[in-house]
Amino acid sequence: MATPAEMARPFAATAPRPPLGLGNAASVRQGRIACALLVLGSLALLQFNVHHGLSVTPDSTRYMGISPIPYDAPVYHWMLVLPHALGVPLLTAAMAWAIVTLCTNVVMIFALLRRAAGDWRHAAVGTALVALAPQFVALHASVISEPPFISFVLFTLWFVLDYFEHGRQRDLVIASLMLGMATLARFTAPPLGAAIVLVLLTTPRLPLARRVADSVLMAVPGAALFFGWVILSTLTVGHSIGREMRFYGNMGPAQWRANLETTAAWLFPDNVPLAFRVSLLVLLLGFAGWQFTRQLAAWRNERADAPSDARTALSLVLGLFFVGYLAFVWLSTMLEANLSFVGRYGLPAYLVLAMLLTLQASGLDRRLAAPRAMWFALAALAAVILASHTVRTVSRTHDAYREGSGFHARIWRESPTIAAVRALPAASLVYSNGPEVVTLLTDRRAGMVPMERLLRTNRPDPNDPPEAQIARIRGEAAAWPERPVYVVAFDNIDWRFYLASEDRLRRALSLVPVASFADGRIYRVSPAVQP
């Protein structure tokens, strides 16, 4: 029982933590076994999810270089095309990287939590909350850039902890380069750099001049790496980040509600009332914010000669990164039209929040009644969320195992329209509302049908209006009558509202029906079509 003096004083921001590296052999062995089981379980889920192949989406094909729309962030593209240049098939390279990044991410999450919390049990629960999340499992079974992005973020955090614990500036340089690579994997990484610099500047353990110098050291190498690529890419291929610094955002109330539902799905599925899920999320965020302020106060009051507390340092970085990441994505929705907070963009925020809450729970001093009650409440909630994650992930995995996912789903593998496209003359030109799936499944290049407006601006392309795109197709059909030009319309691609409608194309290109199927139609552009 706590003494009256202990009950009268505010409880500490964090509980006593064993020094890094200490612990009996049994604890170390148990931690390694727990981490190994998490990795093996994740690999088993991956194997079942990719039974019909990795999930390939339109964004996937941009990284693979088989989409008429170019990629933006280049790192994942490099990871695929460099092995391909050596003769490795694109999907084989993607599968190899899926295994590597999955193992890396699970191990690094566990290692960071074990290192900062000093307890393998908290690390195991925190890692499971991420590794069993349906979004985490689905994205690691996809050809997409989030897994390597997460890997570079975790590497950045690891070397930042090295810096806070040992004060070596070389660790900051490595962390900065890892952050630069994360930014080149996904453009949403800069808030992590800002979070690290803010935590660095607030530590009283170093003189101000050293803090400023180290902040510059944290910023410059990664920034040089990123902006060096921007300049080189602009000069060589004519584009880099692919976005204008103008406000094209068009999200209305319906889109914001959808974003809220996506965020609430971090905890429980959609059949749980939204009000309950949001209330629970607000409570968790309130706890995280309250603990963050206490940890910041403890951080600011550290003695100069005291060893750095890894739990506090990592918690502060994660908390600031969480807020900065969400603000960055919110700003992106203002700059880019038709952009929403889908699961892909939300996963890093969920991962950071899960790690943050795990560390904060591990720091509660369970010798005192109030923090002990909080710890048990968080533990019970973690158990319920893990059960929810398990049920949802097993259900989605079963569906992926049976039907496939993305462009490897059964509806595409058994598509009669795709089968007919394979039989078209080899010399013919093909345009489609799904050129990526044509290229992926038929091994022939296809172009996008004319766009009435750009997806990211919701306005016509001033450099290539739809009339010019239509005229080009007419010109191709008229110039080489012996080389037929086909237009393929897929019914299963119903999200590309920015393309010219099938009716408009029929009129503008005098399309001649060739074949009609349950899932699409094939037309030939009349070679005699006139403007």
Image (spheres, rainbow, N blue to C red):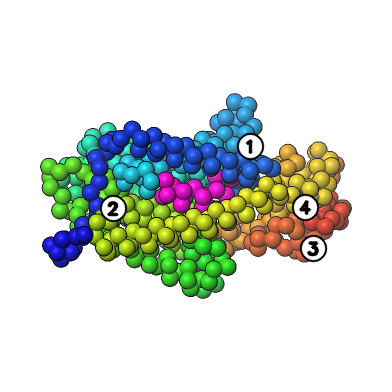
Local crowd size for mark 4, using a 10 Å CA cut-off: few (<14), some (14–19), many (≥20): many
Please give the range of residues in magenta: 124-143
| Residue at x 82%, y 50% (from the top left corner) | 416
- The tag on residue 483 is none
Q: CA distance from mark 4 to mark 1?
A: 25 Å
* Tag 3 secondary structure: helix
Q: Indicate left or right for 174 with 333 as reference.
A: left
Q: Hey, what amino acid is under mark 1?
A: Leu
> Quick one: label 1 or label 2, which is nearer the N terminus?
1
| Residue at x 28%, y 61% (from the top left corner) | 371
Q: Indicate left or right for 66 with 298 as reference.
A: right
Instruction: Say if the magenta span includes residue 133.
Output: yes
Local crowd size for mark 2, using a 10 Å CA cut-off: few (<14), some (14–19), many (≥20): many
Task: Determine which residue is flagged by label 4.
Answer: 488
Task: Determine which residue is flagged by label 1.
Answer: 91
Query: Where is residue 530, by image quadrant?
Result: bottom right
Q: Can the viewer see residue 32? A: yes
* Tag 2 secondary structure: loop
Of 425 and 398, the residue lying toward us: 398
Q: Nearer the viewer, mark 1 or mark 3?
A: 1
| Residue at x 51%, y 62% (from the top left corner) | 268
> Quick one: label 4 or label 1, which is nearer the N terminus?
1
Q: Hey, what amino acid is under mark 3?
A: Arg
* Tag 1 secondary structure: helix
Task: Determine which residue is flagged by label 2.
Answer: 363
Q: Position of residue 161 (x, y in %)?
A: 29, 41
Q: Position of residue 17 (x, y in %)?
A: 25, 46
Q: Nearer the viewer, mark 4 or mark 3?
A: 4
Task: Determine which residue is flagged by label 3.
Answer: 507
Q: Nearer the viewer, mark 2 or mark 3?
A: 2
Q: Indicate left or right for 166 with 383 as reference.
A: left
